[in-house]
Amino acid sequence: MGDLLLVRHGETEWSASGRHTGLTDLPLTQHGEEQAKSLAPLLTGRTFARTLTSPLGRALRTAELAGLTGAVTDADLHEWDYGAYEGVTTAEIHRTRPGWDLWTDGVPPGPPGHPGETPAQVGERADRVLSRVSEALADGDVMLVAHGHFLRVLTARRLGLPPADGRLFRLETGTLSRLSTEHGRPVIAEWNTRS
């Protein structure tokens, strides 16, 4: 059984300022590009049974700069649809909704094409990804390049936890994490690794 490796894309202008960045396709900052390049030494010599990326440019560029080849985009790897909270910081949201929590409350609908998602809906997408890569894990390691909140939900689901428990796994930009197994059970083997 292979390991599931997770790369969170490098920094963007909005991730640096704490703005919820779901489906808005922002480029990496210069620092984000450097973060992505710095992942290459951590991946050198590794082979992957399958490499999947989010279709958003910041994830695709991170995969490219990290030296990953043969990646296939998977629409389910896109970031949480933040609906009306797209581009807004948590501090700004708390001005009108002091008790708001993404992990328990989800988000209100936004403009057309941005209905927003609940934690359960993000969990359903994560479950679909995990189902699709399960066969490839039998052949070796699998690499996923995606986004912070989505990968946190995916980690929770891989560990058998509810989607909202993704709140327990802080995930930094431009990092590598590894989910493995111990005695047949999924475990976190590495988290937020940088070179």
Image (spheres, grey):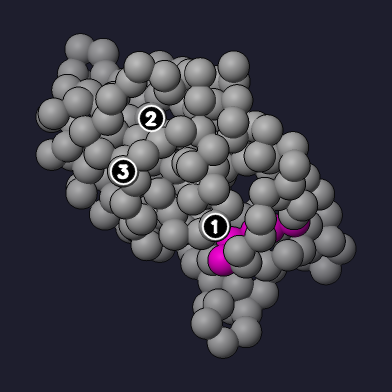
For the C terminus, which image quadrant?
top right
Residue 62 seen in the current view: yes
Q: Is residue 162 in the magenta section?
A: no
Name the residue type under label 2.
Leu
Name the residue type under label 3.
Gly
Badge nearest the viewer, 3 or 1: 3
Picture coordinates of residue 5 (x, y %)? 38, 30
Say which residue label 2 marks.
Answer: 5
Tags 1 and 2 touching, CB below 8 Å: no
Q: Is residue 22 in the magenta section?
A: yes
Q: CA distance from mark 1 to mark 2?
A: 19 Å
Name the residue type under label 1.
Gly
Badge nearest the viewer, 1 or 2: 1
Pointer 3 or 2: first along the chain = 2
Vertical placement of residue 111 versus 187, above or below = below
Instruction: Please provide the residue range marked out in magenta.
Output: 19-23
**Prevailing secondary structure of the magenta residues:** loop
For the N terminus, which image quadrant?
top left
Element type at marker 3? loop
Question: What is the number of the mark on residue 119?
Answer: none
> At x 83% / y 54%, what residue is drawn?
91
Q: CA distance from mark 3 to mark 1?
A: 16 Å
Say which residue label 3 marks.
Answer: 70
Pointer 1 or 2: first along the chain = 2
* Mark 1: few/some/many CA within 10 Å (<14, 14-19, 20+): some
Left or right position of 40 against 28: left
Say which residue label 1 marks.
Answer: 57
Question: Which of these two is toward me, 62 or 24?
Answer: 62
> At x 50% / y 25%, what residue is drawn?
40
Left or right position of 83 against 140: right
Picture coordinates of residue 104 (x, y %)? 56, 54
